[in-house]
Amino acid sequence: MDASDRTLNEYVTATIGSQLFGMPILRVQDVFVPERVTKVPLALPEIAGVLNLRGRIVTLIDLRRRLGIDGNAQGTTMAIGVESRGESYGLLIDAIGEVLKLDDATREPNPLNLDPMLVRMSMGIHRLDGQLLMILDVDRVLEIGDVRAAA
C-alpha cells in the first residue's frame, strides 16, 4: 500500500482511569472545565448534571459511569464538548491528551474479551507504544435514554 492509499484520521485523546480513549476530532467542539454544574433530579446515573456554557445548556455525561470504569476521578475533571441531534453534551473525562493522526488501516477490531457494553460503544482499537487506544463511537455513547427505553 503506498501513501496515496492511506486514510488518516485525527483523534482527540482522553484518559479515563488508566485507559486511553480517542474521539474523532470532527465530533469535538471544545474542551472545558465544568463549573457550576446543576444536578438533575431523577436523572439516570450517567447524567452528571447540566450547565450553562457560553449561553448553551449542556448535559454532562459521566463517561466513567457510562463506560463502566471503576473508581473516582483524580484531581480536576475536564469535559469534551460534542453535539448530536441539535443538543450539546459534555463528556466528563479525567484528562485530555493530544491529537493523534492515525492510519485507518492500523485500526483493529475490539478484543474478544472486551466488556459487551464497551464493544457496543467502540469502533475498534489502535495499538500505541505500550497501550491501547480505544476509539469511541460518540453517537453510541450518547444513546443513554434510547438503550434504557429498549430494555
Image (tube, rainbow, N blue to C red):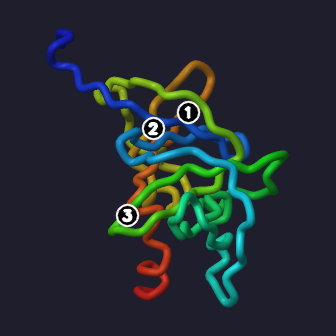
Q: Which residue is mark 1?
A: 132
Percent position of residue 140, x then y: 41, 63
Q: Residue at x 44, y 46 (%)?
A: 28
Report the number of numbered marks. Answer: 3
Q: Mark 1 or mark 2, which is nearer the start of the sequence?
A: 2
Residue 14, numbered label:
none
Distance of mark 3 from mark 2, alpha carbons? 23 Å
Q: Amino acid at mark 3?
A: Ser
Q: Which residue is mark 3?
A: 84
Is 30 placed left or right of 37 in the picture? left
Closer mark to the observer between disc 3 and disc 2:
3
Image quarter hosting the N terminus: top left
Q: Residues within 10 Å of mark 1 (few under 14, many from 20)?
A: few
Q: Mark 2 or mark 3, which is nearer the start of the sequence?
A: 3
Do the numbered discs 3 and 1 sit on residues whose CB atoms are within 8 Å? no
Do the numbered discs 2 and 1 sit on residues whose CB atoms are within 8 Å? yes
Q: Residues within 10 Å of mark 3 (few under 14, many from 20)?
A: few
Q: Amino acid at mark 2?
A: Ile
Residue located farthest toward the front when viewing the structure as drawn: 55
Residue 125, numbered label:
2
Percent position of residue 39, x then y: 72, 78
Distance of mark 3 from mark 1, alpha carbons? 27 Å
Asked whether 36 or 143 is in front, the reply is: 36
Q: Is residue 20 above or below residue 53?
A: above
Percent position of residue 119, x then y: 46, 56
Percent position of residue 31, x then y: 57, 44
Q: Residues within 10 Å of mark 2 (few under 14, many from 20)?
A: some
Q: Is residue 96 above or below residue 32?
A: above
